[in-house]
Image (tube, rainbow, N blue to C red):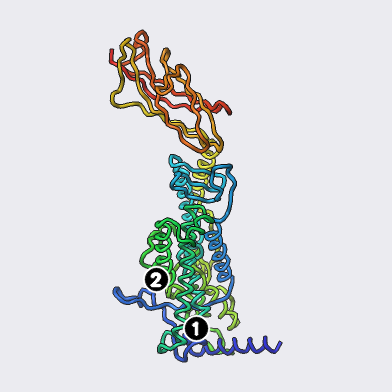
């Protein structure tokens, strides 16, 4: 109980100090002021980067970011090790991009190169989903789930664990080099490198059997490409997450420039309620709040911001909508006994409503969101129909181009064709090939000499390529119109009865 009282007294003193000294950091050096180093007015066109020291805050949005970080990192690192039984002779890794076999395995789905439109559909779905979420609640992707945000958050957590919170990190960087400072810096960068290596290693596991490749990497028997890409992703993760940080979001990422087109007056954005907060200024405990705003100008929202901006300056390109400033402000409002929500998710229209004395309201269903949701539902429906009707038998027919046809000694005309049969089943299949649509045509396979009907055995999850001749007797040449006639190759699975057809043309001399 005594410890609890002491803690509350300490928080009260810190709040009073923050209120008395304006932007003074209660945890830092006396007289230190918070500066939004990346605000537009503080950022010259050409200047060296000013390091941002985000402060740890506590609250619902910080907990939400912890949860998203744990879940997304777990998905990334664990997924290559998940198993999925597809039968003998096939990989049992749940998610695998098998370049040598030209397959993309995703649990029960198996995507062939000619089916890459499924991946395109998934990308379209992801884009439309991003547009919909952004139009409703701003850049929640940037603030919570973007890989740059997740890994930067992880690297900052490591930095905070080793070097301390904001004030301690600032003092450490300002202090002269010593054995202690060198040890802390070395330990931080060492852990960063371990995370970066794990990130690069996990990435290559998506392209080969994870347990096998892991053993080869440890015994230095893995392909050179594996080490090359691990090194590449290690370098980029270390640089972007540990050193560049907010610079990636401000200067490298195109999404901040695009996301403005997704917003409207009813989009929920992290906003400072100027109508409630102004006029801002320090406030002493016990004095009246009449004639002033709730903002005590403590600067905690600036200290918590990983982008180094001041949310009180309004909507900014640099803001990733992580909402940590909301947690920081709510904590201060609790200390000074004012209502929470001075910084909160708000809309431009609600700000205008409050200025006019009207009650705010939330409008999620509006033309923009209806359009995005309808497009999302349409693409999802098309994808589901395509998957439901996905065939495990695919056939392609390519006619010879040189020569187009050959006249045999008996006067008949012969065309040559390459027939490719894709067996997407996880067991071997035997197929019968026949012709339709051209009466009197004779189908032969040069290597076997079989006539009328030909069977081909195709191994599980494999492609077979066979050459065929189609001959049309001289007495049937009148079937050609302008030297051409349509016909169809019919491929029948002898076990299941499934049929695949492919139309083509038979060519001969023009009559």
- As displayed, is residue 268 above or below residue 385? below
Q: Is residue 467 left or right of residue 82?
A: left
Element type at mark 2 = helix
User: Nearest the camera: 161 or 90?
Assistant: 90
User: Nearest the camera: 113 or 352?
Assistant: 113
Q: Is residue 174 left or right of residue 157?
A: left
Q: Is residue 228 left or right of residue 28?
A: left
* Residue 308, image x, y percentages: 43, 75
Residue occupying image coordinates x 46% and y 50%: 123
- As displayed, is residue 16 above or below residue 39? below
Element type at mark 1 = loop
CA gap, disc 1 to disc 2? 28 Å
User: Nearest the camera: 429 or 260?
Assistant: 429
- As displayed, is residue 77 above or below residue 287? above
Quarter of the image for the N terminus: give it.
Answer: bottom right
Residue where numbered disc 1 is placed: 298
Quarter of the image for the C terminus: give it.
Answer: top left
Residue occupying image coordinates x 37% and y 25%: 417
* Residue 130, image x, y percentages: 48, 55
- As displayed, is residue 76 above or below residue 322? above
From this viewpoint, is residue 417 visible? yes
Residue where numbered disc 2 is placed: 244
* Residue 441, image x, y percentages: 41, 15
């Amino acid at each position: 109980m005594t410890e609890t009282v002491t803690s509350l007294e300490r928080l009260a003193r810190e709040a009073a100090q923050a209120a008395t000294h304006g932007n003074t950091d209660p945890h830092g050096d006396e007289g230190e002021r918070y500066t939004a180093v990346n605000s537009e007015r503080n950022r010259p066109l050409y200047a060296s980067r000013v390091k941002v020291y985000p402060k740890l805050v506590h609250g619902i949005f910080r907990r939400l970011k912890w949860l998203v970080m744990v879940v997304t990192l777990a998905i990334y690192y664990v997924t290559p090790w998940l198993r999925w039984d597809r039968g003998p002779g096939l990989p049992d890794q749940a998610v695998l991009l098998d370049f040598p076999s030209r397959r993309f395995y995703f649990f029960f789905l198996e995507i062939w190169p000619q089916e890459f439109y499924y991946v395109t559909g998934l990308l379209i779905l992801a884009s439309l989903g991003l547009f919909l979420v952004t139009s409703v609640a701003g850049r929640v992707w940037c603030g919570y789930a973007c890989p740059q945000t997740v890994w930067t958050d992880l690297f900052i957590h490591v930095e905070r664990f080793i070097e301390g919170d904001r004030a301690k990190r600032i003092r450490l960087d300002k202090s002269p080099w010593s054995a202690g400072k060198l040890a802390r810096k070395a330990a931080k960068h060492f852990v960063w490198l371990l995370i970066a290596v794990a990130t690069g290693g996990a990435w290559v596991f998506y392209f080969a059997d994870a347990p096998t490749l892991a053993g080869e990497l440890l015994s230095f028997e893995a392909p050179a490409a594996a080490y090359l890409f691990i090194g590449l992703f290690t370098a980029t993760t270390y640089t972007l997450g540990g050193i560049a940080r907010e610079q990636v979001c401000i200067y490298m990422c195109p999404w901040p420039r695009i996301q403005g087109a997704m917003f409207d007056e009813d989009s929920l954005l992290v906003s400072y309620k100027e109508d409630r907060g102004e006029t801002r200024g320090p406030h002493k405990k016990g004095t009246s709040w009449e004639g002033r705003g709730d903002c005590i100008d403590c600067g905690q929202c600036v200290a918590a911001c990983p982008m180094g901006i001041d949310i009180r300056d309004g909507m900014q390109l640099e803001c990733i909508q992580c909402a940590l400033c909301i947690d920081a402000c709510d904590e201060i409002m609790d200390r000074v006994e004012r209502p929470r929500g001075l910084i909160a998710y708000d809309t431009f229209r609600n700000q205008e409503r409050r200025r006019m004395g009207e009650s705010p309201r939330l409008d999620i269903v509006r033309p923009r969101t209806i359009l995005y949701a309808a497009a999302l539902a349409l693409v999802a429906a098309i994808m589901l129909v395509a998957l439901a009707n996905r065939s495990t038998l695919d056939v392609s027919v390519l006619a010879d181009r040189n020569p187009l046809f050959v006249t045999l000694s008996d006067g008949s005309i012969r065309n040559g064709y390459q027939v490719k049969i894709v067996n997407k089943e996880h067991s071997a299949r035997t197929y019968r090939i026949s012709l339709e649509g051209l009466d009197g045509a004779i189908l032969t396979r040069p290597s076997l000499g079989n006539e009328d009907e030909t069977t081909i055995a195709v191994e599980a999850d494999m492609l077979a390529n066979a050459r065929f001749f189609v001959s049309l007797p001289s007495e049937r040449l009148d079937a050609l119109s302008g030297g051409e006639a349509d016909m169809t190759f019919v491929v029948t699975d002898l076990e299941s009865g499934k049929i695949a057809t492919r139309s083509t043309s038979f060519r001969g001399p023009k009559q």
